[in-house]
Amino acid sequence: MNSIANGVYSYVISNGGNYPDCILDHPATTTVSNCTILVTGGHIGGIPQDPSTGENYVIRFDNSDQTRIRISSTAEEAEDVVVIQ
């Protein structure tokens, strides 16, 4: 999840402080696999896959100001594991 966060912030730095369009307005959540711009733009080598079969990493803005992102997994056992930056 940290590599996803690093890829997002690399994108933000390269794009004048703008987040990628794949991150929907707060409070909506989307799967990280929808953020292919991170790969095609050279910000991350590939989209990491959740090791749990059938589960996904998801990303959303953590606040209504849309200044922090929250990355987590849909896996039940990862319910309390999040990266907020």
Image (cartoon, grey):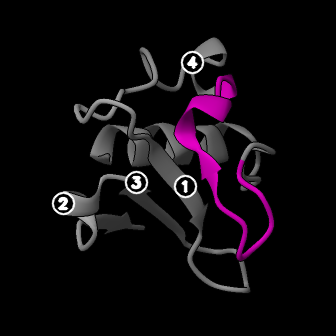
Which x, y percent locates residue 29? 65, 60
Identity of the amino acid at label 2?
A: Glu
Q: Nearer the viewer, mark 3 or mark 1?
A: 3
The disc, 4 or 2, on the residue closer to the chain's N-terminal end is 4
In this rendered view, identify the residue nearer to me: 73 or 46. Answer: 73
Q: CA distance from mark 3 to mark 4?
A: 22 Å
Q: What residue is drawn where x is 64% and y is 47%?
A: 12
Q: Residue furthest left?
A: 77
Mark 3 and mark 1 lie on one chain; the one further toward the N terminus is 1
The Cα–Cα distance between marks 3 and 2, rounded to whole angstroms, is 9 Å
Callout 1 secondary element: strand
Inspect the magenta stretch and tell me whether residue 33 lies in it: yes
Secondary structure of the residue carrying numbered label 3:
loop
Q: Cα distance, mark 4 to mark 2?
A: 28 Å
Above or below, 11 relative to 19: above
Q: Which residue is mark 2?
A: 77
Label number found at residue 74:
3
Q: Which residue is mark 1?
A: 59
Residues at badges 3 and 1 in contact (C-beta under 8 Å)? no
Mark 4 lies on a secondary structure that is helix
56 or 41, nearer to the observer: 56
Q: Amino acid at mark 1?
A: Ile
Earlier along the polypeptide chain: callout 3 or callout 4?
Answer: 4
Between the residue at mark 3 and the residue at mark 1, the CA separation in whole angstroms equals 10 Å
Q: Position of residue 24 (x, y in %)?
A: 77, 58
Range shown magenta: 23-37
| Residue 62 horizontal side relative to residue 27, left or right | left
